[in-house]
Amino acid sequence: MDTLTHALSGALLARATAPSKPSPDELSPNARMAAGFMAAAFPDCDFALRLIDTLTYLNWHQGPTHSLVLLPVWALVLAHLFSWATRQRYPWQAFLGAASLGIAIHIAGDLFTAYGTMLLAPLSYLRFSLPLTFVIDPYFTAIIAAGLTAAIVLPQRRRPAVIALIVLACYVGFQGALHYRAVKVGEVYAATHGLPGAGIHALPQPLTPFNWKIIVEHDDGYYEALVNLWRTRSPAPPGPESGMLQRIAAGYQPVSAAAWTRHGRFGETPSQQALAREAWSQEVFADYRRFAKFPALERIEPAGDRVCVWFLDLRFTLPSLPPSFRYGLCRTGAADSWRSERVRGSFWID
């Protein structure tokens, strides 16, 4: 989830949990909201890993700074920093609760995305995910912003913040129901097409909570469909003047008209698979193997003696746009060693 939404959610939770009549050594409502805002933004400081390289960032993002095990440590550090920043106007103990809640709601927000969060780091680096919300969800953000606005307009009452959190929880519950429906669509496809033991995955998509990517994982391939659970008719195809959002929106079809696309993890032909498997298994590609959850061969690109084998992760593809986080291995001649390379996508984070 985007950092601004995280920060706003921390401020909202801090206001909703503020005492009705704070004592002199407790934070004022505004100070508590500010602490919650900054604490909820803190876990994304791991963005600094981009200074090392993109794959290091991708593998460690939503890692130790997003850990429930380390939450008390981060909250204690932030509480002391906030107290120091206010020149000890408030003791660090006054900030500890707001800092803890801010970090906690950030972790919860990321848990609802498809990326995966290391909740138990450093005891375990297993990633947990309940993919209900796309990384940028305007409705999710709007609910939080509306609650904060009402809390600022009515500074003596915390009820608007509490109501906004309840509405937000109901919205996430609604997304959970849609996720269930999307998974059922995938199960029907697997049963109809004779794919026993297939893994069914439903990933939230941008623009509306009704947009979903359904992935049916079977053997060394995936069957993917982009659906809109609300639509009953296919959208008009985008024209040459259509903007990016229009082109993305047009890619999601009604369930009845869903177009299923097969992606081979290592391609479809024996020659593709042999070369792709060789490239995939290289030690230099270990970081990408660790990152990719739904890896698929995008293309094999020969150019004279040089050949490149490109992979993508189906989590990071959108209609009508180049995939994000595409990595490949290239070599010149069969005796040459493989080298990892990257192709940039449509967004600055690529």
Image: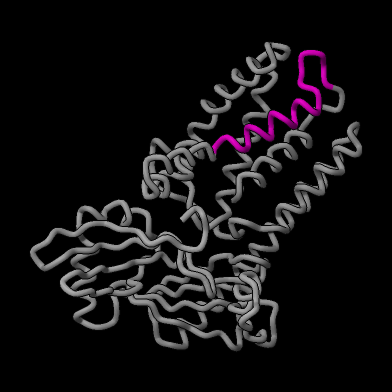
Query: Looking at the picture, how far across and down is residue 63, in whole percent?
Result: 45, 41
Residue sitting at x 40%, y 86%: 194
Q: In the image, is residue 182 part of the stretch drawn in magenta? A: no
Main SS category, magenta section: helix
Instruction: State the image coordinates of residue 230 (x, y, percent, origin top left).
Output: 70, 77
Tell me residue 286's x, y (percent): 26, 53
Q: Is residue 287 left or right of residue 205?
A: left
Q: Is residue 269 left or right of residue 333?
A: right
Residue 131: quadrant of the picture: bottom right
The residue positioned 34% from the left and 61% from the top of the image is: 327
Residue 104 vs residue 83, the one in the foreground: 83
Question: Which of these two is toward me, 181 or 271?
Answer: 271
Is residue 34 one of those drawn in magenta?
yes
Total labels: the figure holds 0
| Residue 297 picture location, percent across and down | 33, 72
Direction from residue 22 to residue 319 in the image, left or right: left
Query: Looking at the image, which residue is at 48% across and 68% down?
Result: 317
Please report the bounds of the magenta region as a residue range: 22-43
